[in-house]
Image (tube, rainbow, N blue to C red):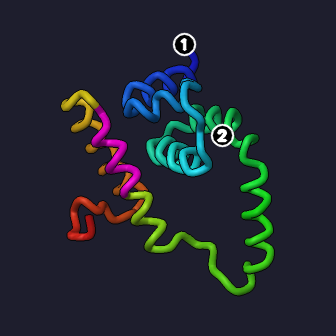
């Protein structure tokens, strides 16, 4: 079994029902779904499955990417494109919601530990250890 296949299997196992349906092609992927799912898979270090998702779905959002590129070109000299506190809060929320969708309680606890470890390794503040949650 290839690394990509193992990562896909693990991610689909952890996903909630709706995300699994999306990734199995039973529900339509939205632009925000792609953003959220690729962020989560990247954060968890599932680089091969992240790339597979990107390759499979990004093409259907070419117009949204074109609009983002135009917006960036128009505002790059005025606006910083570094992640904001709001972006970080949204990303934290995505990770927390992903965890709550894990059906098996023991697996959920293990995933929460992996996420805590990733926050540490990336030098990020774990929102579960603050009053920001």
Write the residue at 70% across / 86% down: 78
Q: Residues within 10 Å of mark 2 (few under 14, many from 20)?
A: some
Looking at marks 2 and 1 on the same chain, the residue that comes earlier in the sequence is marked by 1
Does residue 96 appear left or right of residue 8 in this picture? Answer: left
Which circle, 2 or 1, is nearer the viewer?
2
Residue at the spot 44% in from the left edge and 73% down from the top edge: 85
Packing grade of label 1 (10 A; few <14, some 14-19, many >=20) is few
**Where residue 72 appears, x then y in whole percent?**
74, 72
Residue at 48% across / 66% down in the picture?
87
> Do the numbered discs 2 and 1 sit on residues whose CB atoms are within 8 Å?
no
**Above or below, comparing residue 79 to residue 126 in the picture:** below
Which quadrant of the structure image shows residue 17? top left
The residue under label 1 is: 1
Q: Residue at x 45, y 27 (%)?
A: 12
Q: In which quarter of the image is the N terminus?
A: top right
Q: Main secondary structure of the magenta part?
A: helix
> Helix or strand or loop: what does disc 1 sit on?
loop
* 6 to 90, vertically: above or below: above
Q: Indicate the secondary structure of the residue bearing disc 2.
A: helix
| Residue beneath disc 2 | 54
Quadrant hosting residue 104: top left
Task: Please check the rendered image and state whether residue 101 is part of the magenta-colored stretch, yes or no.
Answer: yes
Query: Magenta part of the protein: which range?
Result: 93-102
* Residue 67: percent from left, percent from top: 76, 63
Q: In which quarter of the image is the C terminus?
A: bottom left
Which of 6/96 is in front?
Answer: 96
């Amino acid at each position: 079994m290839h690394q990509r296949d193992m990562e896909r299997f693990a991610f689909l196992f952890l996903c909630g029902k709706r995300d699994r349906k999306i990734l199995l092609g039973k529900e339509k992927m939205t632009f925000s779904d792609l953003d959220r799912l690729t962020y989560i898979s990247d954060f968890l270090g599932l680089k091969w499955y992240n790339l597979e998702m990107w390759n499979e779905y990004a093409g259907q959002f070419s117009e949204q990417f074109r609009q983002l590129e135009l917006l960036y070109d128009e505002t790059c000299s005025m606006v910083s494109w570094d992640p904001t506190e709001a972006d970080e809060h949204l990303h934290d929320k995505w990770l927390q919601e992903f965890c709550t969708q894990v059906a098996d309680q023991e697996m959920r606890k293990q995933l929460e530990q992996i996420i805590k470890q990733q926050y540490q390794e990336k030098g990020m503040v774990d929102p579960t250890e603050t009053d920001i949650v």
